[in-house]
Amino acid sequence: MPIRFAHHPGLVAYLTVGDPDVATTRAIAVAAIDAGADVLELGVPFSDPLADGPVIERASHRAVANGTTLNHVLALASDLRAARPQTGLVIFSYLNPILRYGLERFTNDAKAAGVDGVLATDLTIEEAEGHYLNAMLAANLAPIFLVAPTSTDDRLRRIAAVSQGFVYAISRVGITGTRQTLASDARSLVERLRRFTQLPIVLGFGVSNAAHVAALGEFADAAAIGSAIVGLIEKTAPKEAPAAVAQFIEGLRPVPAAPTTR
């Protein structure tokens, strides 16, 4: 199904699958969807997550230690597709686990699981053109790419030309992690990108609270929340994590003001 954002701003919630275990990840995922997440990014744990900050890195290492693999992520995607059919599902991975699994096998299995799109964080547009993109499109999977404030207009144009689902704009250069304020060049990046695409633009990396979501809602289509959710899971007992994540997500969008009466 196409990725859709039923709210503005939309919310994309990232989870490291298998942290603390796959069953708890499933419960958290359902709770996040029911609390208002439009899209779930199902993170494939990897032993060397270079683009991630310490919070997601620790989660990835815990999930790897638990034996979580890409097979578990795809099985969870299939389960969630049946349980919450309207939710957007994106596999969020480094390229290595996909290649080890086998690109064609991965795209076929992802399609069968009901996955909507794939974001390989360390895959450049140059490396994607050709075999990777052909495999994604043959399986009707949306290829999703990262763009950064340092991306040239030519690079934005090339990425926009092959992207589907949405384009993921990172608010700053560097690793993932929560921040007190949004980077000042986030708006200018989104404005530059809009010259080349009509797809929704999701802003992530450092988005961690309701103030951030409200601010980016003025110029972007959706917020991607990762480290804030993963950090909450890390410090919460597994049985309490689904409710804690649901409460956090519910608090990310401003509550409409009640009508006044005279």
Image (cartoon, grey):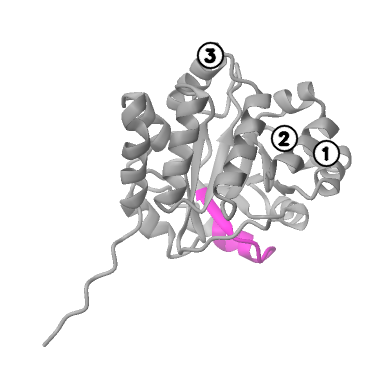
Where is residue 8 drawn, in percent x and y? 45, 64
Q: Is residue 70 magenta?
A: no
Mark 1 is on which residue type?
Tyr
Q: Which structural element holds mark 2?
A: loop
Mark 3 is on which residue type?
Asn
Q: Which residue is mark 2?
A: 123
Q: Which residue is mark 1?
A: 132
| Quadrant of the rendered image containing residue 194 | bottom right
Q: Look at discs 1 and 3 and give the one toward the viewer.
A: 3
Q: What is the crowding at mark 3: few (fewer than 14 residues within 10 Å), some, or many (at least 20)?
A: some
Label 1 or label 2, whichever comes before in sequence order: 2
Label 1 or label 3, whichever comes before in sequence order: 3
Q: What is the crowding at mark 1: few (fewer than 14 residues within 10 Å), some, or many (at least 20)?
A: some
Q: Quadrant of the C terminus?
A: bottom left
Q: Which structural element holds mark 3?
A: loop
Where is residue 79 drawn, in percent x and y? 60, 38
Q: Which structural element holds mark 1?
A: helix
Mark 1 touches mark 2? (CB < 8 Å): yes
Where is residue 165 drawn, in percent x and y? 66, 55
Is residue 104 shown left or right of residue 91?
right
Residue 60 visible in the current orientation? yes
Is residue 110 shown left or right of residue 30?
right
Q: Which residue is mark 3?
A: 66
What's the residue at 43%, 53% (across, down)? 36
What's the residue at 77%, 53% (across, down)? 162
Q: Distance between the Cα atoms at labels 1 and 3?
A: 29 Å
| Quadrant of the rendered image containing residue 132 | top right
| Quadrant of the rendered image containing residue 258 | bottom left
Q: What is the crowding at mark 2: few (fewer than 14 residues within 10 Å), some, or many (at least 20)?
A: some
